[in-house]
Amino acid sequence: MSILSDIAAGLQKGEDDRVAELVRQALDENREAVTILNEGLIAGMRVVGEQFRVREIFLPDVLLAARAMYAGLGLLKPLLARDGIPTAGKVVIGSVQGDLHDIGKNLVGIMLAGAGFEVIDLGNDVAPHRFVDEARDRGASVIGLSALLTTTMPVMKDVVDLVRSQGLHGKVRVIVGGAPVSDAWARQIGADAYGYDAASAVERIRTLAGAQA
Amino acid sequence: MKERVDWPPVETVPDRAEVLRLQGIPGGVALPRRIVQILDEAMAVYTEAAEPRALVQDISCEAFAAVYRGEGRNAPVTPIEGVVDRAKTLMLFVATVGGCVTERIRDLFARNEPAHAAMLDSVASAATDRLALLLGHRYPAAARDAAPNDVRTLGYSPGYCGWHVSGQRALFETLGPEAIGVTLNASFLMDPLKSVSGVLVAGPGEIHRFKPSWAFCADCRDKPCLGRMPSLPIASTAGAMSRGVEGA
């Protein structure tokens, strides 16, 4: 078994210390950071994602794997940046203005990072212009909006409208999610996608970011 | 009558199966030891950090009608109207597990412990539901004493069953739960987040029965009504309660 397979296996078991140790070892063996990322960490997270999709494993397993992913990624990030290796994409996420719920948004952020995306988490109670300003200024291709109240859902439309009025439609895609949100709502407000849960949000964002590239 | 209730945290610890259900883990699954350990730790943190408390107040049908009307944004027809019309006693309530638990959840996320954070969030959500269940067992005492085998008490919350979440404002103005440290923001969101509000409706069990086939039911993912209805004829129970968010 290669060290990259070991990294992937350790990640699937959520062994963060072990993954960090193996990544260090792989770097010492002069393996390229991007290879360790793609064939070790991301390969491991793909398996985790698939096992989660078919309910072989559950949310805690995925989050333990994500923590292990961070442990390895933390060591690789400076090297990837030095080598100019692009991430899977940049995504701005946050809970919309008036909404203080952040558990769902946090889970999406963790799973996105695990899938190799650079996540710009604006937190909760975020004003529409902040989403758009951050996406434009930092070159993000996707904005992810979370709302858990019907009273805060309309803010999602404000963000979509702002993206259009600033001429960013087509360059910056908007995905929405949260308990009261639906696919029909996403279509009604002109959002590009709807994520039923964290796992499906990551899949949709992967598609959106790919379409953007 | 208006009364404050405080519980020792240990009395409000939720059922493990309910916590796991909120994590998307079905009953009967053999859990790996590491998940059991995370659950145990989350339960322990909850017991240490929670400050469970509630405020309840009797309200007449007429006064409740004004609270329920709120800002006039309810669905045109809702099951709550039919339930309340046949009730013996109504009580407004707000209950919370306090803000410390939410702080601990955020702290765990900040320390890159997402599995522990998410599990604690589920424990706190299930415990918040349990507070309403406990209130339903305790109140209204007079109605239960008069007909202990007949009266069932269930809670209904703004944001569910067609009662628009903006109804929170009138409920808060009437009850004044700021006295137990629960406030409302402009979006009708309660702070602390892990809080539940609504009306306890006591009456014959059958008044709580309705088919969840209303237009707004399509947007309700959890359908807690389905979980509590089957238990109605058997024992006095409040069943699972909503947490003051709409359409969850």
Image (cartoon, rainbow, N blue to C red):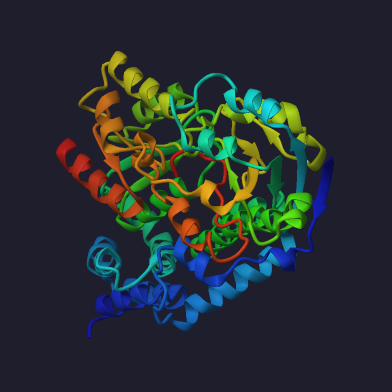
Instruction: Say whether residue B193 is left or right of residue B208.
Output: right
Q: Tell me the quarter of the image containing the N terminus of chain B.
A: top right
State the image coordinates of residue B7 (x, y, percent, origin top left): 78, 59
* Foreground of the two, B62 or A99: B62
State the image coordinates of residue A66 (x, y, percent, origin top left): 40, 63
* Foreground of the two, B85 or A146: B85
Instruction: Say whether residue B35 is left or right of residue B170.
Output: left
Residue B43 in the image: above or below residue B22 = below
Q: Residue at x 75, y 48 (%)?
A: B54
Q: Do we see residue B205 in this rendering?
A: yes
Residue A175: quadrant of the picture: top left
* Foreground of the two, A8 or B71: B71
Residue B60 in the image: above or below residue A87 = above
Q: Do we see residue A124 in this rendering?
A: no
Residue at far bottom of view = A1
Q: Residue at x 38, y 35 (%)?
A: B216
State the image coordinates of residue B175 (x, y, percent, origin top left): 75, 33
Q: Residue at x 73, y 68 (%)?
A: B10
Residue at far top of view = A165
Q: Residue at x 41, y 82 (%)?
A: B30
Q: Tell me the quarter of the image containing the C terminus of chain B.
A: top left
Q: How many marks?
A: 0
State the image coordinates of residue B132 (x, y, percent, origin top left): 65, 52
Residue A90: quadrant of the picture: top left
